[in-house]
Amino acid sequence: MATAGYVKTLPDAPGVYRMLDTKGRVLYVGKARSLRKRVANYANLTGHTNRILRMILSTASMVFVRTETETEALLLEANLIKQLKPHYNVLLRDDKSFHHILIKAGQKPQITKHRGAKTDNGVSFGPFASAGAVNRTLNQLQKAFLLRNCSDSMFENRTRPCLQYQIKRCAGPCVGLVSEADYERLVDDAKSFLTGRSTKVQTDLAERMAEASTNLEFERAAALRDRIRALTQIQAHQGVNPQGVSEADVVALHTDKGQCCIQVFFFRSGQNWGNRAYFPRAMRDCEDAEILEAFLGQFYGQKSPPRQLLLSHEPTNGDLIAEALSTVAGRRVEILIPKKGEKRGLVEHALSNARESLARKVAESATHAKLLAGVADAFDLSDPPERIEVYDNSHIQGANAVGGMVVAGPEGFVKGQYRKFNIKDASLSPGDDFGMMREVLTRRFSRLLKEDPDREGEAGGVSLWPDVVLIDGGAGQLTAAVETLDALGVEDVAVVSVAKGEERDAGREVFHMPGKRPFALPFRDPTLYFLQRLRDEAHRFAIGAHRQKRAKATGATPLDEVPGVGAARKRALLAHFGSAKAVTRAGLADLEAVDGVSKALAKKIYDFFHGGEVAVAATAPTGE
């Protein structure tokens, strides 16, 4: 036990500590108001839960970072947990960024979808819980406010209105079909609606519709009616819209038999922008308050918190969390645990959703466990596999070849572990699927042998070694895979290939394994459907990676290879000369005339395309 030796050397000050095992892997990241008192507590082996006691006994060394305040320690702890993913911490496994609606700054602003951190290039509204929610809202907003969604380059080069104008989803500002004042009014109306002043916007539109009807401008009145209808449809999709909650996240936790679900509902400008369920990884003996504290610290680490958090449980160190979130947001963030009224109703609604989501998750996990047991029976494995890796290749006659690997485990697809492999072996003949598979497996397992030769995995024993390798292909693919793994000395991983059956019909797949005759599974066997899903997911992932590579290659130019030529200078060169080929043929003086291109860079570009030759006048003697 390494904790006792640190007590005398530590300050009575706040900070963050990391507990490491004998191999230097991080077991736990924690914060403390007093590092000395926290470690002294660990040195006393009595009064701990079984989880904490196991963690202490596994600790070989510790690393400490002193901070100025406990708030700083809380923020640093959350960042380190997300980065290091220690085994004994509560871990938020799904922390994707959210979508927002962005109205860009400048003249004739564009309305578009924006993902990630807030930008300074306009005003953003959100977050929206899903891409579907933001797409539906954006679709109706375009009908209601007629704002353009085209890119700036398309907007600047239009000479006539596009299809969006024809179907009444844009006012046509690109060709002057709407005045600047009227378009600015549309922008202001959209911002007012998205900031919660929807009643005022709809009342104003209704008055203008009545006025147009009175003046016998029936076409204009019909257009205003359609805009009002679009706004109504947006509100219909938003579900519960509370009267007394303007800006808040409702966070509800439900635990059952060692598993937990946290539902987050997003309310902005008095409108419900959707919800999302999270299933943090937590030990069975973790308290609700501890889980909620860890979740809030990690969830808002890269996101701007709202003005209020309505929680189902009191988190550990609630005042400290509120102070830390206020520091991050640059304004006051209030944490409430409502007991009655409308806010309590919102929390109860989120709790019921968390309860139902966890029940579905548990049912899915039980079904998945049965499927993995079926895989073990089908492939004669001693135990259900903990990790299945599925491989496939994608190319067009050998061009832009990519290998894909998808991973499945006890909880389904592990998308954070997916990998793509750009095929690098230039000696392969076009379309050599066997050679591509050899390269992919060689690179994958050579890295595993280097990083985890003892197959102990990450801290806590989470192994990255597969129990089953599933190859999309027939006997030839299987032979290539087995020979590759044998050459690397990997002999205890089950290798299976799945070939499409007669007429490539789903359900007639034939499986190949070393030393066994090809076999098929019963037509309606759930295990067969499960293996089909794995194969199809690998196929989808490999094709997607290939298309991305092909699209990138399609837009590539020789200028991409020139050192010092970035995106801005590339655009300037193409705008000046008209094409990449013209740039390659340009003289030194012509290159120097391009805005943003210095004499040194012009010389570098010229030398790149002319092999360092110096251009001279054609005055050499002609008699030689």
Image (cartoon, rainbow, N blue to C red):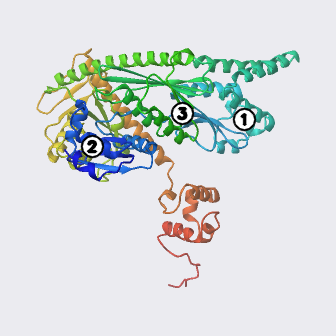
Residue 479 higher or lower than 309, as above or below = below
Residue 149 or residue 542, whichever sits in front: 149
Q: Secondary structure at mark 3?
A: strand
26 relative position to 133: left or right: left
Disc 1 crowd, CA 10 A, few/some/many (<14, 14-19, 20+): some
Q: CA distance from mark 2 to mark 3?
A: 45 Å
**Number of dots carrying numbers:** 3
Q: Quadrant of the N terminus?
A: top left
The residue labelled by disc 3 is 99
Camera-near label (1 vs 3) is 3
Secondary structure of the residue carrying numbered label 1:
loop
Q: Quadrant of residue 501?
A: top left
| Label whose residue precedes the other's in the sequence (2 or 3) | 2
Marked residue nearer the N-terminal end (1 or 3): 3
Q: What residue is shown with label 1?
A: 161
| Left or right of 64 on screen, residue 582 | right
Residue 188 percent coordinates (x, y): 73, 33
Q: Is residue 153 above or below residue 426?
A: above
Q: Residue at x 74, y 37 (%)?
A: 173
The residue closer to the viewer here, 20 or 610, is 20
Compared to 311, does 431 lie above or below? below
Frontmost residue, 270 versus 95: 270
Q: Residue at x 16, y 31 (%)?
A: 513
Q: CA distance from mark 1 to mark 2?
A: 73 Å
Q: Amino acid at mark 1?
A: Pro
Could you tell me the amino acid type at mark 2? Ala
Q: What residue did someone put label 2 on?
A: 40
Q: How far separated are the C-alphas under marks 1 and 3?
A: 29 Å
Which residue is at a point 28% across and 18% down the rendered structure image?
Answer: 366
* Amino acid tagged 3: His
Residue 472 can be seen in this image: no
